[in-house]
Image (cartoon, rainbow, N blue to C red):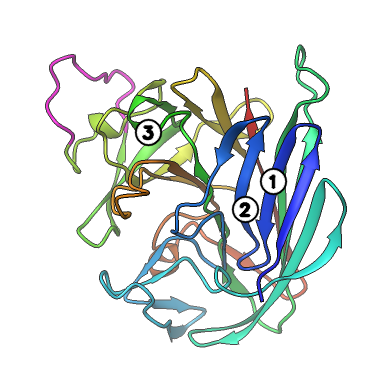
Amino acid sequence: MTDFIELTLGDDNAVVSTRGAALLHYTVGDRPVVAQMSAFDGAVLAPWPNRIADGRYDFNGRSHQLPITETSHSTSLHGLVAETHWAVSKRDDASVTLSTDITDSPGYPFALSIEVTYSLIAREDVGEPTDTAELRVVALARNIGQDPAPFGFGFHPWIRPGAESVDRAQLLVPAETWFETDSRLLPRAIRPFDTGSFIPADHGPDEASCLLCKDFRALRTLGPTVLDDAFGVPQRGDDGWSRVRLRGADDRTVIIGMDESFRAWQICTGDELDHDHRRRAIAIEPMTCPPNAFATGSEHDVIDPEGELRVEWSIALR
């Protein structure tokens, strides 16, 4: 059974599903910010986001084999909880907390309790009206088992561009590196952006391996650029948060922020979706580890018994 939980605060509205603890919709007034796209819509991705090559990884001297869930690329995709039913443990008009457990799953013999809270809160920015809000998400993973557990969080909201297509939107991704991928969308190289690089006016069509085409450190129009890419070494403000900006064709800007626990962004323009959804929204995904982190054994968290990992991220419309 799937329940849909509506949150409201002033003119702001969000809808969360108990399936995958997924953020399905978020609107500010009559402006859609988050929408459904029939592809991991707003789901929580845990205990890993993105892909693990061939579902194989080693941890603490043992080898593990996960089920292959993306057969076209022979990978294990987006963790274990995106399709499960989560329990509602707290709820009021403007917030909801959902929880689920992972216990001894095939290829992941660890035990964790996961809790996610969605809250609409009044923004405190100077000059902002007091009746506007932002969506805040706090997630907590606790190790309830006897062994240390490899772990990663990810979140998969689809952001509306203020028009029918993402092509007219402008994107800023504050990150210092780009993960170049192979035909299976697995990283094969980490390429740093040149601080002096820019995109010439006569630059040719987008190419999957073109570093210039992936450089969104300054706000620029997406145009026909195809993205299903991870970006690392996030640039951060004085508060430790990194923030992606998507300025829509309506001159409204969606800001997705993530705290210092997150190590990477994943950005996807939805070009592989069906005709009705293709390039109608852009997935902007905070991730605590990059793709294939379990297989490479780097840049993922390890939660000790009775330990926990707490993360926070947000979505706001300016």
Q: What kind of element bears circle 2?
A: strand
Residue 190 in view, yes or no: yes
Residue for badge 1: 14
Q: Is residue 148 magenta?
A: no
| Amino acid type assigned to the residue bearing label 2 in the image | Leu
Judge left or right: residue 73 versus residue 12: left
Cα–Cα gap, marks 3 and 2 = 20 Å
Residue 166 badge: 3
Front position among marks 1 and 2: 1
Locate the N terminus and report the quarter of the image it occupies. Answer: bottom right
Query: Badge 1: few (under 14), some or many (20 or more) residues near its Cα, within 10 Å?
Result: many
Does residue 163 sit above or below 202 in this rendering?
below
Q: Which residues are magenta?
A: 193-206
- Tag 3–tag 1 contact (CB < 8 Å): no
Front residue of 271 and 256: 271
Side of 63 relative to 44 (left or right): left
Q: Residue at x 25, y 71 (%)?
A: 72
- Number of residues whose C-alpha sits closer than 10 Å to that of mark 2, classed few (under 14), some (14–19) or many (20 or more): many
Q: Secondary structure at mark 3?
A: helix
| Residues at discs 3 and 2 in contact (Cβ within 8 Å) | no
Quarter of the view holding residue 164: top left
Secondary structure mostly taken by the magenta-highlighted segment of the chain = loop
Seen at 27% across and 40% down, the residue is 226
- Location of mark 2 (residue): 23
